[in-house]
Image: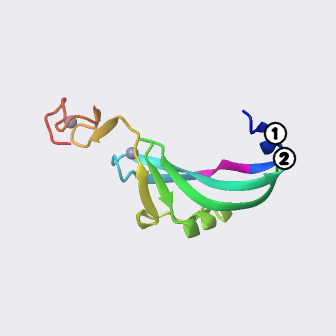
Amino acid sequence: MSHMFFFAIFGIQDKDKYIGTYNNITCLSCGRLARYEIYKYYRYFHIFFVPIFRWNVKYIVKTSCCGCLYELDPFVGKEFEKNPSTEIREENLQKINCYSPFKYCANCKTDVPAEYNYCPYCGGKC
Ligand SMILES: [Zn+2]
Ligand SMILES: [Zn+2]
């Protein structure tokens, strides 16, 4: 914590801000009906905790079903911020990561542990 004094005067911070929700999507990862939660991430430079400028702005989409993360096209993200009825299409999203320990068996509609290649409930490939 020796750099606390330095940061008290000016510094660089990361910030994330919840922007809104986009309903009625079919999840690209697990196939369930879900919604996107949209966040804006940016880095800013501040002096005495007053933000001076921002850069590295990214729009991140999280699925409500399985928690997959996508990076949203910044142009679409900006539009969505102004107008929450902006359409978010599949091609605007780039997959970042999926933290879900489960995958979804469409055959028997069950969550299956991600390490299984075959569904332990119905025996189908998933
Ligand atoms: Zn999902
Ligand atoms: Zn199954």
Based on the picture, tell me whether residue 78 belongs to the magenta stretch.
no
Is 10 positioned to the left or the right of 43 in the image? right
Q: Residue 43: percent from the left, percent from the top?
A: 67, 54
Q: Is mark 1 within 8 Å of ligand 1?
A: no
Q: Residue at x 78, y 44 (%)?
A: 7
In the displayed structure, 16 sits above or below 77; it is above
Classify mark 1: helix, strand or loop.
helix
* Number of callouts: 2
Q: Amino acid at mark 2?
A: Ile
Q: Residue 41: percent from the left, percent from the top?
A: 62, 53
Q: Residue at x 84, y 47 (%)?
A: 9
Instruction: Work out whether residue 84 can be spotted.
Output: no
Picture disc at residue 25 = none
What secondary structure characterizes most of the magenta part? Answer: strand
Read off the magenta span: 12-20
Residue at label 1? 5
- State how far apart marks 2 and 1 are (Cα): 7 Å
Q: Residue 86: percent from the left, percent from the top?
A: 57, 65
Q: Residue at x 35, y 49 (%)?
A: 29
- Residue farthest to the left, as pictured: 123
Residue nearer the viewer, 120 or 4: 4
Residue nearer the viewer, 73 or 15: 15
Is 124 positioned to the left or the right of 78 in the image? left
Residue at label 2? 9
Q: Residue at x 36, y 53 (%)?
A: 28
